Amino acid sequence: MDENEFRRHAEAALDTLKQHLIELEEADDAGFEVEEQNGVLNVLFEEPPGKFVITPNTPIRQIWISALSTSFKLDWDQEETAFVLPRTGEALTPLVDRLIGEHLAG
């Protein structure tokens, strides 16, 4: 995949994720806030304190998530037409939902 194609897929995936997280944030007391800065999504937690950073890594053509003291590196899966964590097969949004749940559960 060339850089332009990666950027299109990554921007679309991150925008979809951002909209999903904003809906969760507004729906009830989600326990987190979402911020976007220069194409990077930050999920900020008050209790327990924490921060997830979700960013495209263009040179490597991956989306990286820094969360729960771990780095998750998602590759583009052409069949799924989604960024997927190879180890578990989870797509970006379900993975972030799971990680948020794990963080909030403490």
Image (cartoon, rainbow, N blue to C red):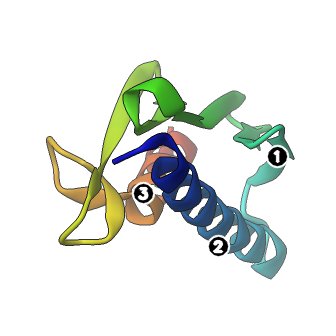
Taking the spot 48% from the left edge, 60% from the top edge, the residue there is 97
Left or right, residue 26 beside residue 4: right
For label 3, the residue is 92
Q: In which quarter of the image is residue 53?
A: top right
Location of residue 23 by image quarter: bottom right
User: Distance from label 3 to label 1 (Cα)?
Assistant: 16 Å
Q: Distance between the residues labelled 2 and 1?
A: 13 Å
**Residue 68 in sight from this viewpoint:** no
**Residue 84 versus residue 21 in the image, above or below:** above
| Residue behind mark 2 | 20
Is residue 41 shown above or below 14?
above
| Helix, strand or loop at mark 3 | helix
**Could you tell me the amino acid type at mark 1?**
Glu
The three-letter amino acid code for the residue at tag 3 is: Leu
Q: Position of residue 41 (x, y in %)?
A: 71, 44
**Residue 66, x across and y down, in percent:** 51, 27
Disc 3 or 1, which lies upstream in sequence? 1
Q: In this view, does 11 lie above or below 102?
A: below
At a point 35% along the width and 33% down the height, the residue shown is 73
Residue 102 in the image, given as x and y percentages of width and height: 44, 46
Q: Which amino acid does label 2 sit on?
A: His
Q: Is residue 76 visible?
A: yes
User: Along the polypeptide, which appears first: circle 2 or circle 1?
Assistant: 2
Q: Residue 36 carries which label?
A: 1
Report crowding for label 2: few under 14, some 14 to 19, many 20 or more residues within 10 A (C-alpha).
few
